[in-house]
Amino acid sequence: MNTRVYLLSEARGLSRDLLGGKGYGLAEMAQAGLPVPPALIITTEACRRFLREGAVPGLWEEVQAKLAALEGLTGKRFGHGEGVTPPLLVSVRSGAPVSMPGMMDTILNLGLNLEGVQALARATGNPRFAWDAFRRLLAMYGEVVLGEKAEVFEEKLSALKERRGVVSDAELSPEDLEELSFQYLHHLEARGTPFPMDPWDQLQGAIMAVFRSWQNPRARTYRRIYGIPEDLGTAVVVQAMVFGNLGEDSGTGVGFTRNPATGEKGLYGEYLRNAQGEDVVAGIRTPEPLERLKEYAPELYRELEGVALLLERHFRDMQDFEFTVERGKLYLLQTRAGKRTAQAAVKIAVEMAKEGVITKEEAVARVEANALPGLLRPAVDRDRAPEPILKGLPASPGAAVGHAVFSNEAAERFNAQGLPTILVRPETTPEDITGMYLSRGILTARGGLTSHAAVVARGLGVPAVVGAEALRVYPEEGRAQVGGLEFNEGEVLTIDGSTGEVYLGAVALVESAGEALLQELLAWAEPHRRLGVRANADTPEDAQRARAFGAEGIGLCRTEHMFFHEERIPWVRRLILARTPEEEAEALERLFAFQKTDFKEILKAMDGLPVTVRLLDPPLHEFLPPLPDLEEKARAGDEEAQALLERAKALHEQNPMLGFRGVRLLLLRPAIFRMQLRALLEAAKELKEEGFDPRPEVMVPLVADPKEVERAKALAEELFQEYGPIPFGTMIETPRAALLAAEIAPLVDFFSFGTNDLTQMAFGLSRDDAGKFLPRYVEEGLFPFDPTERLDEKGVGRLLRLAVEEGRRANPRLKLGLCGEHGGEARSVQFVADLLDYTSASPFRVLTARLAAAQAGLKGPKALAR
Ligand code: ADP
Ligand code: MG
Ligand code: MG
């Protein structure tokens, strides 16, 4: 039978996948000589088997044997105090291979019962502490294992405090806590889930509860948001307890080896005197900065600095560690690569490379490319900002403007109407994850820089201000108060996660300055990038911005957006209504002038670089006013509205996505095709005469058959005769086009994969409607991720690969690009990096695409050879 339980000292060389992140970190720290309380680790393999089969034969015997070893190491006995030796108490902690903060529940003080409380009181000479430990165990066990709501225990605690006329827990006497413990015991008994007095039963129940917690909805939501696979399972750590709540020379804290918000080098963190670790993480009390230790515990501070150094050297990355001090003695309880803002990630990677801790290639590989847009988050315009109404801690940088909401439900309601929100809470818990995910910013009244709200916000890349203590939040009443000022749900707030300031109303924002460190990192990255990076841009402004971010051209310029301008749409409508060739010609003449101007501006902004223009894609009825509006005007006698209404009815489609659009429209209304292409060619001609170097390319959308391409090409050739040819291509966005790539390729100069439509059609789903089921699909593990966000390699990727291979074979000079939303998503970019010539991303995602493409290059044969 294989071993599934390891002591820290036995875990050397075992993988993080097997030990979980927490177990792995503890084992590594112990081996590096850091003080870690003895522990045993039950592997993720045991968890997977348990979830699959409902039991793991032999596991329990192994746990018992290793716990006996823990008894040996600590000189204490599990479940029994002896004389002045307290019983061995343990924590039962979950730890997945990937860090999932706050997502799974830890039980502290396990092993206590009525007899044990007496022994603990005797051994510590502190009955208050002993009963406090017991009532905490009862509440945690009651919640995590026995399934009672946490509030039930909190309410009983509050009621007791009220009866005693005290405000804080600390004012309760040992007798009070004893009484509370019995209340908890009786309550659990009465509800049919008695607390097991036998410590071994407690342990068994707790281990199974941790296994099961892998499946709880909070954990699933977290995995969905962060794209963590559903089948990893969690390890369980059973660890000897140490106590941070044994007096003023005890305490608990969280440290970072560098500042997780800015990346600044040096010890950083928070400490709470006379407290248990969960108090810090839960944000129940606001801790003090570690700096403060310099004043009253300088030796401890120096020791922590030493720990920080050693951790960084050992793990070669910024670490986030948890520690507890029991009567002056320091213990490390956890370490992991610290979550950080995009800004900090870049600074830390670049500086560590310069310090020689990691290589430049590692620095490039380490920064999460998808997080880069966060670096470009706007900031509050200091010169135009009014007085803030409130100041809290700057937990996650960047500024955000939105409507105040106090619940998940309100966040959903506002966002459904397209209104951005700021989630305002007393503090956040994993239950708030939906609201946090939907909101532009997060504001809490309590908790420190390592509270749940702060950690999750940084992970999500959302600005956050936490611990704004002057704020009173009343979620049930949908209002909040700051001094004499009150604001309600829906009120617009601006928060600045870089300074901690909060403003009433929408404050002017400025775009963030280009980051020098980021440029340095990208300079290291560039030599490893083979894939070209272009931008999706429809306006000169977007083109300029994209170029500043390093775009090497435009991969998708959508022409329909140019039609929506106020002074243009009437001419589009005339075009739709045209009854005679003359009427059509007049409308087209006007639109030609508009388009030519636009093309000129865009080609000028991208001077010397390719600009791929896509001819009209949407169906014509999209340019008409909404039906109800037309009906009302028509009823009021408006003749044009009447005509439009008739056309609108005639053009109406059950399913516009699959309707009369794209190449279908262009071939059957060739005048539109000619007008657009002529505008592009004319714009380029004029620019050339002005001394510029325009590089236009043209492509047709939505083809499904080579005949369509042939016909479109023939139309284009007419104009090429007159102006000279430009590269002519087609989008590959229907599955049939991908399948017929070999026939289409010889007709064109390039393919551009429109992965939005290709995904919709390959899956048979519409992005506009998928919101109703896709999130649940991912949550239920039916899809590993949302294919509209990240390219589905298996199916859509297969179509793409096939089209690439067969297309290239049929036309060796064929150029290949991608222009869907996926073109700026890091993992999708990495997938196509060796398949295509270029990807095209929205301007703010150009940096992501550049970095991701370089990271793909690093993963290639060159990186392996090192
Ligand atoms: P999470 O996965 O949420 O970080 P942890 O397993 O780290 O949960 O436990 C939560 C808190 O409980 C920690 O911050 C730590 O301070 C405390 N804790 C866990 N195990 C022990 C222990 N053996 N002794 C003292 N405190 C502990
Ligand atoms: Mg922890
Ligand atoms: Mg499309």
Image: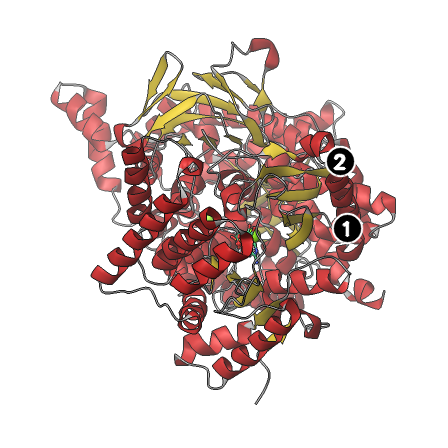
Q: In which quarter of the image is ligand 1?
A: bottom right
Q: Which residue lies furthest to the front in this view?
A: 83
| Camera sees residue 521 | yes
Label 2 crowd (10 A; few <14 / some 14-19 / many >=20): few
CB-based contact (under 8 Å), mark 2 and mark 1: no
Q: Which amino acid does the dot numbered 1 rest on?
A: Glu
Residue at numbered disc 1? 312
Residue at numbered disc 2? 298
Quadrant holding the C terminus: bottom right
Residue at image point 52% right, 28% down:
595
Q: Marks 2/1: CA distance?
A: 21 Å
- Residue 606: percent from left, percent from top: 68, 32
Label 1 crowd (10 A; few <14 / some 14-19 / many >=20): some
In this view, 600 is above or below 781: above
Q: Which amino acid does the dot numbered 2 rest on?
A: Pro
Using residue 749 as the reference point, say whether residue 526 is left or right of it: right
Secondary structure type for disc 1: helix
In this view, 279 is above or below 854: above
